[in-house]
Image: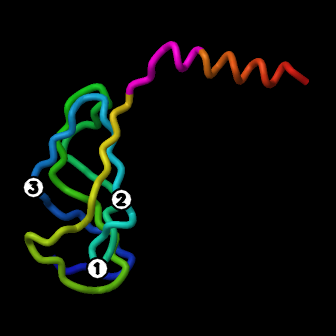
Amino acid sequence: KEVKKNELVNIKIKEIEVSPRAIVLPCIVMRHAFGIVAGLAAAGKPMIVEERRVFDEVIFQPICDGVVHKGELLGVVNVFYASIERRLARGAAEKWLMERLRF
């Protein structure tokens, strides 16, 4: 697919399945020579993080003109599992309040 500098383009990829309660962030350091993966996308309605999601295209932001060929690595994504332990959240809130009320 031909890409032009500073023009966002959607590029189809092999499906990436993301498990429930996972957050996906593109890694800016590991990128393609012509640009970066700005985000992942999928057709249909937006889904909540608690559901399983399948992404089938990326939003690619080129930094120079060129041609991206099929099979090339566009970038790397980091998958973080998001689960807040209630005890930790409650303790953090109490600590924050105590520091604010100390003065």
Give the mark count.
3
Residues at marks 2 and 3, CA–CA distance in whole angstroms: 18 Å
Q: Amino acid at mark 1?
A: Ala
Instruction: Provide the residue designation for mark 2.
Output: 27
Q: Are marks 2 and 3 in contact (CB under 8 Å)?
A: no
Mark carried by residue 33: 1
Q: Earlier in the sequence, mark 2 or mark 3?
A: 3
Where does the image place residue 72, in percent across and percent down from the top left? 14, 72
Give me the residue at 20% from left, 31% from top: 52
Q: Nearer the viewer, mark 1 or mark 3?
A: 1
Give me the residue at 32% from left, 66% from top: 30
Instruction: Provide the residue designation for mark 3.
Output: 14
Residue 28 shown left or right of residue 59 in the figure = right
The secondary structure making up most of the magenta span is helix
Q: Is residue 28 above or below residue 20?
A: below
Where does the image place residue 10, in percent across and percent down from the top left? 23, 63
The segment highlighted magenta reads 83-90
Q: In front: 95, or 68?
A: 95
Q: In front: 86, or 63?
A: 86
Q: Is residue 99 above or below residue 45?
A: above
Q: In front: 3, or 27?
A: 27
Q: Toward which corner of the image does residue 62 lie, by quadrant?
A: bottom left
Residues at marks 2 and 1, CA–CA distance in whole angstroms: 14 Å
Residue at the extreme bottom: 65
Please tell me whether mark 3 sits on a helix, a strand or a loop: strand
Quadrant placement of the C terminus: top right
Q: Is residue 44 above or below residue 90?
A: below
Q: How many residues crowd mark 3 within 10 Å: few (<14), some (14–19), many (20+)?
A: few
Q: Earlier in the sequence, mark 1 or mark 3?
A: 3
